[in-house]
Amino acid sequence: REGTCPVSLRLDAESWKHEQGLPPGAQACVTRTNRTGFLCHDRRSCIPASGVCDGIRTCTHGEDEDEALCRDAPRSLPGFLVARCGDPASWIYSDQKCDGTNHCGDCSDELSPVSACPPCGPGWWRCPPTVFKYCSCIPRSLCRDHVQHCSDWSDEYSCPGL
């Protein structure tokens, strides 16, 4: 019958995770800084995506460093933890996307349309940066510091600073 799937082909989320060798219950959460996170098994601790498989056991039971989860990153990581860069071979953790820093090396994690990042936040100034660490915004703390950070010098002459 159209629109149905044979029972033998149905997998619930936990079965799929088990089949992939992922720890049961790997779930997304939102961190205190409003970023994508990994929910620890205690269902209380939400660690940033970039805190998973970083060599430091952050979750009480160490599930953020689980061998099955980390053995073949990014393929072994749940999709909610990973963001692809403009170069398909490159990836970053999802909480590093749209954070103002050029993690991908080509600014694809910061510039639209690939990343769909919102405009610069209140602590940032939009300009064409001279430092490749930033893509389209610089921290306002760099404004009016007598050092050129924007190719048009707007950080020294137009930016109101903090």
Image (cartoon, grey):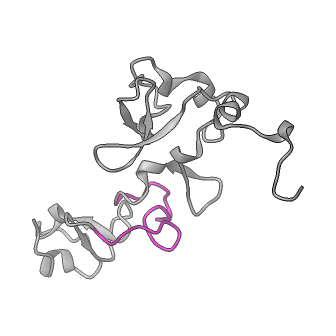
Mostly what secondary structure, the magenta segment? loop
Residue 116 lies in the magenta-colored region: yes
Q: Residue furthest right?
A: 1
Left or right of 160? Residue 2 is right
Q: Residue furthest front?
A: 1
For residue 154, which quarter of the picture?
Answer: bottom left
Q: Residue at x 30, y 78 (%)?
A: 151
Magenta residues? 100-120
Towards the viewer: 1 or 147: 1
For residue 12, which quarter of the picture?
Answer: top right
Q: Residue at x 86, y 36 (%)?
A: 8
User: What is the x, y in percent for residue 92?
Assistant: 51, 49
Residue 127 lies in the magenta-colored region: no
Q: Residue at x 58, y 63 (%)?
A: 86
41 versus 127 height, above or below: above
User: What is the x, y in percent for residue 106?
Assistant: 50, 64
Q: Residue at x 42, y 51 (%)?
A: 96
